[in-house]
Image (cartoon, helix red, strand yellow):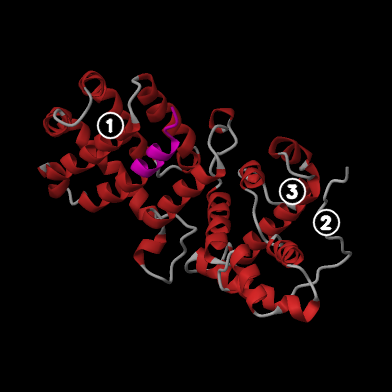
Amino acid sequence: MYTEVDVFVSNFTLIDPEIYQLWIDGCSSSEAVSTLHQRSIAKQTGATVELIASDVLDHYRYYDLDDAVIRELLGRKLSSRHRKDLDEVAERSGAPLRCCRRQFDNVRRVFKAVEEMPGNVVANIRSTFLISEPLAKKYGAVVFIACMRFETAKRKLQYLSFNDFYHCAQAIMGSWTYSCTGPEYYDTEMDREFLLELRELRILLDKEKEHKHLICMRLKPKLLEKSYQELELNFRLYTRALVGLACNLHRGRELRSLFIDLLERCVEPLRLGSWPKTDLAQFLCAYEQCALQMDVLREADLKNVWERYMRVVSQCLLTMYHL
């Protein structure tokens, strides 16, 4: 019995410009194989469709990212000294060491090239490295997390995948960075004025009873009875966690610990209440919208600040809420 082994071996990189252009155009590997086959590449070279597919996949792997590897690289310093310490990354991700080194080098190269470029980080990565938009978005999330030095390596956070952090990073970049204020600003830099304004949201705690009343009226016909009882019993715990988190994000240390704080102060108490995710989504929506109905935010000119804050926190909590 013989086992088929699909291997490409080379001592330097050969880039086929035709395959490279298909990659830049955003074609998947299967779409690229189909396109090349239709162009009669097989007749010209005598190659089988299977061989063309292997060649295409080999080209497509050059800047590709493996989610398991990148998850292990998050939170690590992207310095040449740390390149020597990737054995643990290989062991934890199950990927070959050379694969981990390739991805570390690629991420480091992208990070160094775009970290100080103004404008949209994904657009900068695409224009500099000519990679597809979905792949550029992944690199953009990694660059952003590295720039912000978010804590992602704590043991409690190990249950979160790279995809979880990707969605959280996309939400933060879209609502909490200077990209919201104009194209000449960085979306890898937090809007400091916004973070300082978040401190003013503590006025919501003075209207806790009114806020709770509005939410309960809205959600009583919608939530499961158990979830509604949980809301009535522990509303103070939830609202103080959500507002308290906002009031401290202007401090660098508190911002870097955003994910662990979200987990410990919000996700873990919600898990104890066994909230179904659908009920949690309804609660977060009502929590945001009912606050906007109250005069306290309008009079303090904080409605936009509240919306920007809750847009991200709701996305992060729903992403991190794994039962």
User: Where 178 falls versus 307 (above or below)?
Assistant: below
Question: Residue 18 location, x and y as percent?
Answer: 68, 78
Disc 1 crowd, CA 10 A, few/some/many (<14, 14-19, 20+): some
Q: CA distance from mark 2 to mark 3?
A: 19 Å
Q: CA distance from mark 2 to mark 1?
A: 50 Å
Amino acid on which disc 2 is placed: Val
Report the quarter where the C terminus lies: top left
Quadrant in the rendering for residue 29:
bottom right
- Is 160 part of what is drawn in magenta? no
Residue drawn at x 75%, y 79% is 43
Contact flag, marks 1 and 3 (Cβ < 8 Å): no
- Give SS at disc 2: loop
- In this view, the residue in front, 12 or 259, is 12
Q: Earlier in the sequence, mark 1 or mark 3?
A: 3
The label nearer to you, 2 versus 3, is 2
- In this view, the residue in front, 289 or 40, is 40
Question: Residue 124 location, x and y as percent?
Answer: 54, 69
Q: Is residue 43 left or right of residue 262?
A: right
Question: Residue 150 location, x and y as percent?
Answer: 53, 43
Q: Which mark is residue 111?
A: none
Quadrant in the rendering for residue 56:
bottom right
Residue drawn at x 58%, y 64% is 28
The residue under label 1 is: 279
The residue under label 3 is: 100
Q: Is residue 298 left or right of residue 115?
A: left
The residue under label 2 is: 7
Q: CA distance from mark 1 to mark 3?
A: 40 Å
Please give the range of residues in magenta: 313-323
